[in-house]
Amino acid sequence: MCASVKYGSRGPALIPRMKTKYRIYYITLFSVVLLGLIATGIYYITLFSFWPHSIESSAEWSLDRRSVHDAPLVRIPMSSPIPERGDLSCRMHTCFDVYRCGYNPKNKIKVYIYPLQRFVDEVGVPISSTGLSREYNDLLSAISDSDFYTDDVSRACLFIPSIDVLNQNSLRIRETAQALAMLPRWDKGMNHLLFNMLPGGPPDYNTALDVPRDRALLAGGGFSTWTYRQGYDVSIPVYSPLSVEVDLPERQPGPRRYFILSSQTAIHREYRVELERLKEENGEALLLLDKCSNLSQGLASVRKRCYKGQVYDYPQILQESSFCVVLRGARLGQATLSDVLQAGCVPVIMADSYILPFSEVLDWKRASVVIPEEKLPEMYTILKSIPHRQVEEMQRQARWFWEAYFSSMKAIGMTTLQIINDRIYPYAALTYEEWNNPPVVKWTSVNSPLFLPLIPPRSPGFTAVVLTYDRIESLFRVITEISKVPSLAKLLVVWNNQNKSPPEAIDGLSLDQTHMVERSECINKFASVFATMPLKVVEHRADPVLYKDDFPEKLKSFPNIGSL
Amino acid sequence: MQAKKRYLISLLTGAFLVLLFYFGGGVPGPAATGSRSRHGYSRPEQPWPHFSDPLQHFSPWDQSDTEEYNVHISPRQKRDVNSSVYKGKRCRMQSCFDFSLCQRNGFKVYVYPQQKGEKISESYQNILSTIEGSRFYTSDPGQACLFVLSLDTLDRDQLSPQYVHNLKTKVQSLPLWNNGRNHLIFNLYSGTWPDYTEDLGFDIGQAMLAKASISTENFRPNFDVSIPLFSKDHPRTGGDRGYLKYNTIPPFRKYMLVFKGKRYLTGIGSDTRNALYHVHNAEDVVLLTTCKHGKDWQKHKDARCDKDNAEYDKYDYREMLHNSTFCLVPRGRRLGSFRFLEALQAACVPVMLSNGWELPFSEVIDWNTAAVIGDERLLLQIPSTVRSIHQDKILALRQQTQFLWEAYFSSMEKIVLTTLEIIQDRVLQQTSRSNLMWNSHPGGLFTLPQYSSYLGDFPFFYAKLGIKPNPKFTAVIHAVTPLVSQSQPILKLLVSVAKSQYCAQIIVLWNCDKPLPAKHRWPATSVPIIVIEGENKVMSSRFQPYDSIISDAVLSLDEDTVLSTTEVDFAFTVWQSFPERIVGYPARSHFWDNNKERWGYTSKWTNDYSMVLTGAAIYHRYYHFLYTNFLPNSLKSMVDQLANCEDILINFLVSAVTKLPPIKVTQKKQYKETMMAQVSEKKTHSSRWADPDHFAQRQTCMNKFASWFGGMPLVHSQMRLDPVLFKDQVSILRKKYREIERL
């Protein structure tokens, strides 16, 4: 029980007020319980009898047939319309219908996934050579299992087609575009989100998906600054299947056997020559790996790298280096980035104009080094100039980025949706710290709620809070003394004795022997709740400037302190 | 309430809850995610099914685009192609900026000489003189990396009196124009009534724009810089501080949301303002518009004008600004409006309603931490949105407005320097600031990335990173007298400092004209003594960022300082708690002299202080770097010429950065007396305190410094830090720093 009394007023009779408070509390509780019951009832009724019949096309599916081959076949007429090419000036406020998302107290967007269909052209050839890929399936099931998902198309704010466009190479572009336009809610691609990781195709390798998509948002894995619509598209990583195949335990940050490691196999000749020159200059610090020529193609070759006949395991070897080179290939986005991060190796990214994955929210300066391609010959000197402690922090940060945002299709999908969610409800967006601080830092760092260096003026004064239990006499003494202080604005007495009302008469005081013991117990209890000891020990104490100096007391701003 | 009754009720409640659980437990809430359980008793409402088929990977294991790529054009050629294709509206640093100009001499900015007969507005004049006074300036175009025109491009509204005609030909005739490559063009206003386009009215070629009210469609990311709209009266340097003097908790003010501004009856920009009255409730949401503007507003006036105008006159804008939690910032004629900076300064959290406005310095500032970014299309939701914001968040937003205002917006100088620093960060790439440096105290202008790219090397981020400063210090002793006898105070000082358990090394800075004494003359100590011969033997060399300083903390000492080991130890433990401040012994104070109308300096023992002199002080080594690289040559050479005031200057600097006073720690009584004694006994030039001019000079310094900083950064303090049991009546044996009170 606790009551606040403005200084000067006598303690009022608190008990009756308390009663009403409790009464209201219980009444509310009862109503909540009742309402809950009613709601459950209604829920059951709807479930069994009037289930809304608005769910589209998927009605004929049943449980036991969960194979992609059973998805309904859709034939695309030759003349079916093709969406517009995609508008480079699109932004959330021009190409996105925010009314669909609406206001909701949770500040969460609702995402609808189109049911799977198999699109074929007029002669029955599928629009994609792979159909639904394992990764896209993982992505969609992760989304459907998440809080973002809604099955109610009319409540959805974002629509995700089930047409897999992760890899442009396996697509027939024109037909895929036609298929998109056939989606029932397509509406010029408004509020539709496409996921693509490998954009473009030979010979030019465009940096964004070539499928015409009108106003649809693109979560793309290889954007350049010229194709990325800032604040509209989302730059995503290229998923590396090794993320699930290989379990690399986290290594403590610190120096590694090699300083720089290059593990990519698809490096252009020009760059390989430059890397080799660097290797000549700096010797053992660099390790340049390439494809193993004697191994057959296939899975085995993916997991091996060679240098002069010596074979290394990939991606394990990445853990042996402080820095790992991630050079652009034909495309800007490289799956190697994911492997490198997973190994806790600091990526050295050389891909001019590349928009780094999730760069809208992630601070890549803390986890990577970005070097212009032109400066490849200076790489060694640039990296050498980075302080050791920073390299260690980057190693930790790299691993954390992988764990949180790269490690699975689910992580990639959730991050993408969260970024879009943050744009729609910016006032409820995750903070920089929430996105970027690894758990270690989250636990140890201090973010004071009063972070502005302010020295408040004396004028508003201060509020004195006196905690009291039973010792009336000393309470009155404290009140009399404190009230002499000119800066006192208000005095708050917290009456902490549940069994007694605040004083009118003065009781006899007793010195409580158990007091100190109790307080120690309190401290232990609090520390266990905080799971750590938040109090810090200091060896200094703030005193007035002339404290206890041989100086006339009357000249001191705070005379008589310490002279009691 | 009787206990029985209470128990009964809670029991009943419990029973109900249990019932509810059994009844409804199997049913997930409507929003629940699990899908499997639902299939049991209803048709599947089709979340994504978990397919059982073996599916292919999206990209085959042997990505074989390599070969194709290798025979194709080389990456070098591809880069060249990019830079020739992406011009004009698609300019980026990679395609429209020549980095090679910056490699030779670093980031230097050239300002064209002003031509006769060209009128330049005061604002633009201020921008130019700020650049000329900054450390980036060069007068040699051959050294420059960035060029700034002397032609006034701030106001490109044809109807404005400031409008410069024939800019196109004037610009084209400049010999260094080079189609705008590496040029920066400042602009506040563009376009005119009725549509206010963002066209500048001349071909800017490949030049970068630092422009106010720029829209996301026209903004070229990482190439242009969005700057805030500021008024003619915006101060050139210094600038007013934010209005927030203290935090109130809970952080609510009289009004929740306010706005007071014009409504335009003709031309663009008023759609949102026209609708504001729907949200106005005349209580805590006060949104006022007036139709009165221009000469003939009456001609165009609509049905609401009279009512709106009457309501408008009822409220005082400044009163509302100071007493509101949120301030609405809707677009005006252009996307940005003056309301933005006004609200920011007033600690009134801006609620942006200006779709498509690329917010000022958006490249580096995380505006979600200081403003609420609303959507004009959702105007009617704005009140419920701001009401839903938790009070902790409001407290943080409000403090951040003040930080940003003081760090980047309060003066023209800050706006211009921030613009230049952003471009410098792009040019230097590796040594650029991280997000945290820009968005947390003390801000990007005071956090120089050239010092270190690691946040933990700065004094400001220890708490944020959850780390502690290095537990050792380096002592730097400033020596100006030759070493003649073994009883000189410097030798005693060396011994007592070296005995400190926290001492890593001692650097003797030899600023004496006599040659270095032989090695054996220095006392033998457990820590290394490094003797450095001062560069030019000038005062400022004591704050050089010497590479040999390896610890975070620097203990700066005069050669005649008398300090005991205990005092050093205690000061260092205090510094560990306040690593961003100066912690030390000799305290001084400043005051405003009303008669002379200037700042005064006093060394009297008073009740407060605002400086701790570097004769015996501990501070972070970063301040050496800042002193050398941030302060202008004019101030440093003044210090060198006078051989005085360097300690005042560093106090100015540190207080300007931290906005906090230094910290004085308790010293042994004798310190002052021995100091005084020394002063009176030897009248050599070494004891600069004896010089009668010395004091007068220090007054002059104060005023010179204050004018460069654009205000008085020093802050008074009345606090001294003593060891916990200092002079308390307990046994001396229980005290850890007992030396300090012993005479």
Image (cartoon, coloured by chain):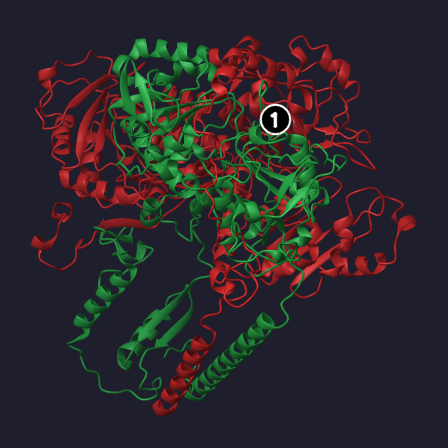
Q: Nearer the viewer, residue B41 or A256?
A: B41
Quadrant of the rendered structure where residue A401 is? top left
Read off the residue under disc 1.
A226
Task: Out of A34 and B29, give the one closest to the viewer.
Answer: B29
Horizontal relation, residue B495 to residue B183: left or right: left
- Which chain wears green? A
Quarter of the image that includes the C terminus of chain B? top left
Image position, residue B36 (x, y; %): 47, 60
Classify B532 as above or below B496: above
In this rendering, position of residue A409 left or right of residue A90: left
Chain label for disc 1: A
Instruction: Give the x, y percent position of residue A13.
Output: 42, 88
Kindly identify the residue that appears in the image at 17 percent across and 55 percent down: B725
Q: Residue at x 62, y 73 (%)?
A: A49
A386 or A362, nearer to the observer: A362
Can residue B232 be seen by looking at this rendering? Answer: no
Q: Which quadrant would the N terminus of chain B be assigned to in this image?
A: bottom left
Does residue A191 lie above or below B706 as drawn? below
Give the amino acid type for the residue marked by disc 1 in the picture: Trp
Residue B515 lies in quadrant: top left
Sort mark 1 into few (<14), some (14-19) or many (20+) by Cα contacts within 10 Å: many
Identify the colour of chain B in the image. red
Residue that sits furthest to the front in the current view: A123
Image location of residue A1, percent across then percent down: 36, 79
Residue A416 in view: yes
How many marks on residues?
A: 1
Q: Secondary structure at mark 1?
A: loop
Quarter where residue A261 is shown: top left
